[in-house]
Image: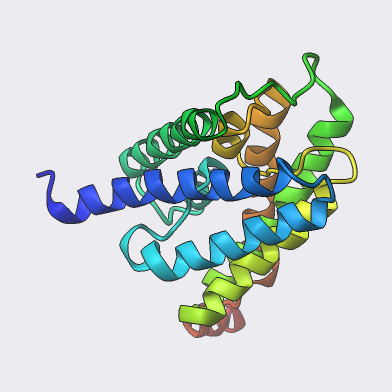
Amino acid sequence: MFGRDKLAQIVGEFLGTAVLASAIYSVIGRVSFPLYAGLAAGITAGLMVLIIGKTSGAHINPAVTVGLWTLRKIETVQAIVFVAAQMLGGVMAWRLNEYLTNSTLTSIAGKAFDWRVFIAEAVGTFVFAFGVAAALSHKYEGGVLATAIGGSLLLGTVVASYASNGFLNPAVALGLRSWSWTYALAPFVGSIVGMNLYMLIFAEVPISTKKSTKKR
């Protein structure tokens, strides 16, 4: 049954992604220094964790949702719905920003597939997703969780900005007219590898598992 809680999750992901894209655009539309865009993204992501984190988890990024899906932290149907809501949030940010600025947003993504950009986006998202996995593994809550996720996004954005626009988010890339196969695929690769690597190597092994391993 489609209840109030599920509706809140979908609307939260939709609005959270739209706000994230708009916040980033408000900075890159004025300055080109990537640190400021990273700060805008990190602060906004942290605030969204505090605002809608208990409702939907505040993924606000298709790459994060898919990464968590590979870890079996979210069901398939829910992941599909979240990704759809996030992409629609990116579209809303695109149209809203065009309306508010009374101008058409021009594409800032290259037309051809670029391996340098792909690797930059993938590595940046890896850093971000690695931090997200660590925060979830340690079961951070509240301000600590918001700081960990926002800080990880800031760091990942700065790393990626060496060779790309550093959005690390297909929905935001769509909303800010940085859409191409490069920007669409790279964040998924970085998120999946980053989250799974952390959980495979760095996440604490449950005590019961440790005991059973010793017995063998």
Horizontal side of 19 relative to 42 (left or right) equals left
Residue 29 visible (yes or no): yes
Tell me which corner region of the image, top left, top right, bottom left or bottom right, holds residue 46.
bottom right
Q: Give me the residue at 30% from left, 52% from top.
A: 9
Residue in the foreground of this view, choosing between 20 and 212: 20
**Extreme residue in the left direction:** 1
- In the picture, the quarter occupied by the N terminus is top left
- Residue 197 vs 134, above or below: the answer is above
Task: Give residue 3's position: percent from left, percent from top.
Answer: 12, 50
Task: Give residue 180's position: percent from left, percent from top.
Answer: 68, 22
Horizontal side of 134 relative to 157 (left or right) equals left
Tell me which corner region of the image, top left, top right, bottom left or bottom right, holds residue 171.
top right
Q: Give me the residue at 35% from left, 47% from top.
A: 75
Residue in the foreground of this view, choosing between 99 and 37: 99
**Extreme residue in the top direction:** 111
Task: Give residue 107's position: percent from left, percent from top.
Answer: 70, 21
Q: Give me the residue at 62% from left, 39% from top.
A: 188
